[in-house]
Image (cartoon, rainbow, N blue to C red):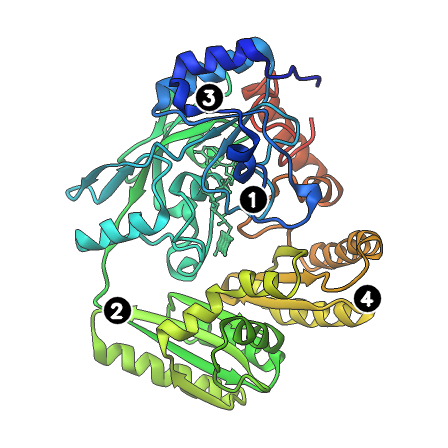
Amino acid sequence: MNFNKVDEKVVKRLKEVVGDNYVLTDPEKMESYSHDEVTGDKYKKMPEVVVLPANALEIASIVQLANEKIIPIVPRGAGTGYAASSVPFLGGIVVSTERMNHILEVDEENMIMVTEPGVRTGEVQTVAAKHGYLYAGDPCSGDSSFIGGNVATNAGGNKAVKYGTTRQQVSGIEIVTPKGEITTLGGKLKKDSTGYCLTQLMIGSEGTLGIITKVYLKLMPKPKNVMDLLAVFPTSQQAVKAVPKIIHSGIMPLCVEFMANNSIKTCENFLQEKLPHSDVGNYIIVSVEGDNEQVLEEQCMLIDDICSQNKALETLVADSERIWKARKSFGEADRACSLIFSAEDIVVPPSQVANMVEKMQIISKKYGIAINCVAHAADGNVHADILKENMDIEIWNELLPKLRHEVYTYVYSIGGKLSGEHGIGYKRVHLLEEFANPVELKMMKAVKKALDPNNIMNPGKVIQI
Ligand SMILES: Cc1cc2nc3c(=O)[nH]c(=O)nc-3n(C[C@H](O)[C@H](O)[C@H](O)COP(=O)(O)OP(=O)(O)OC[C@H]3O[C@@H](n4cnc5c(N)ncnc54)[C@H](O)[C@@H]3O)c2cc1C
C-alpha cells in the first residue's frame, strides 16, 4: 500500500482538531517518539508529526482525516514496548495518549475502575490499593508503562500465575475504530455471551485494529499479606525443574520467577549490590499471598521442602525490595553491558521451560554470543536477551537472524510461540510470517482487512498485508 505524506495542509487540519500546542513537528521534540525500548538504529524512525489529543472525539477526527488522506496512524503509550510497535516506520501521524491520563471512576460496588489510556500502570495499582483493592496487572515496566499500552499488548508480568495477563483484568474498552467511529465493547459486566467477544480481539492487537480510549479494569479484594521466598540452586536445570513441583503441590503462588546465574551477575554488576550466592546460584523467586499468616507460613515451609528435595543450596525469606529491584533491572542491566541486544520473549508449555533454558545455553555456546535468561517460569515465558557486546556490527547482523531462526525452529518444535507478552510489533513480523500456523495467519489478515480496509492503523505491525 502506498501512503501519502503528512503535508502542511494536514498539519493545519490536525492543529484545528487538537490545538496548536499539541501538534509536534520539531525533530528535537519528536525524537523520544522515534523509538521504543528495542535497541539498534534499524528500529528507529522519526515521525512526520506527533499529535497529543485530549479525548476520543479528537482521536476520531484524526483517524477520519487519516482515512481521507490515506496516511498511517501509529498509536502510542509510554513507548516502553519491546517490539518496536509504536514506531512510525511507514511514516504518518503518531497519536500519543499521554494527555489522556485521568482515572475516571472507581466503582466500588461493581469493583471496576474506569481509566483513560494514558494513566500509568503504577498509578492504577496505587489508586486501587488506596480504595482497599488490588489491580492485578503488574508488568515489570509498571512505573512507566501506560494502561492503554498494557491492554494493547496484553502485558503479562509478575502476578500472571495467579491472576492471568492484562486480558483477564479487562471487562470492557472504548475504542476509536480504524474508520474513526467511537464505540464501547464490553463494560462493567461480569459475564457476556452476546455475540463475538470483540473486547478480547482488541486486547493484544498492538494498535492495529483501533485506538483504545477508555478501559474498564477489574478490581480484586486486596490480600493482607504477601511473602517472597528466594530459593538458590547450583544449576539452572535444578532451579527450573522445581517449578512444576511447586505448582503441583496445590499452592497457587502469585508468581514464580527464574533468574539464571549469568543474569544475576549482570544485575549485580549493574546495581553494584551484592546478591545472595551470586557466585554460583540460580534463583527461583516465589511469591505467595493470603489473609491468614499461618496458612502462608505453611505454604512457605512446603516450598522450602520441595526446593530442598530439588537440591537447593538455600531457601530464604527474601529481602523483597532488594530481590525485586534486581529482577526488574534485568533489561536495563543487559543494556548497560551491551548497548545493542535482542530481547526475545519466548513462550513454551510450562513443562518445557527447563529444555528451553538448556537449549539457549547450547545455542549461546555454538554462536559464541552471550544470552542472559530470566523467566516467568510458571507461565512458560522465557526472556532471553541476546547480547551483541563488542561483536562487529556486520557479523552481528549476519549471525543474529540465523541464531533467532534456530531458536524459534526449536520453540515451535516443542509447542511454543514467538511471544508470551511483548507482542509481535515490527520486530517479529517476519518471524510470524515464517512460523505461524498459515490458517491462523490468514484469519488474522482477514480480520485486519475487514476492520481497516485502508490499512492505516499501525500498518506494518503484527501482520503484513
Ligand atoms: C524494563 C521493562 C520491563 C518490562 N516488563 C514487562 C513485563 O513484565 N511484562 C510485559 O508484558 N511487558 C513488559 N515490558 C514491555 C512493555 O512495557 C509493555 O509491552 C507495555 O505494555 C507497553 O506499554 P506502553 O504504554 O509503553 O506502550 P507502547 O510501547 O507505547 O506501545 C505498545 C503497543 O501498544 C500500542 N498502543 C499503545 N497505546 C495504545 C492505545 N491507547 N490504543 C491502541 N494501541 C495502543 C502501540 O501502538 C504499540 O503497538 C517491559 C519493558 C521494559 C522496558
The part of the image, by quadrant, that contains residue 185 is top left
Distance from label 3 to label 4 (Cα)? Answer: 45 Å
Cβ at disc 1 under 8 Å from ligand 1: yes
Q: Amino acid at mark 2?
A: Gly
Q: Is residue 45 visible?
A: yes
On the image, numbered disc 2 is attached to which residue? 290
In which quadrant of the rendered view does residue 133 lie? bottom left
- Comes first in the chain, label 3 or label 4: 3
**At numbered mark 1, what does the secondary structure look like: helix, strand or loop?**
loop
User: Gap in Å between the C-alphas at discs 3 and 2?
Assistant: 41 Å
The tag on residue 282 is: none
Q: Which residue in the structure is indicated by mark 4?
A: 367
* Depth order, front residue of 40/165: 40
Q: Nearer the viewer, mark 2 or mark 1?
A: 1
Write the residue at 76% across / 55% down: 409
Q: Give the mark nearer the N terminus: 3 vs 2.
A: 3
Do residues under tags 1 and 3 come within 8 Å of each other at their CB atoms?
Answer: no
In the picture provided, is 284 more to the left or to the right than 403? Answer: left
Q: Position of residue 241 (x, y in %)?
A: 57, 77
**Mark 3 lies on residue:** 177
- Left/right placement of residue 242 relative to residue 189 reads right
Q: Secondary structure at mark 3?
A: loop
Residue that badge 1 annotates: 36
Q: Position of residue 58 (x, y in %)?
A: 38, 18
Local SS, label 4: helix
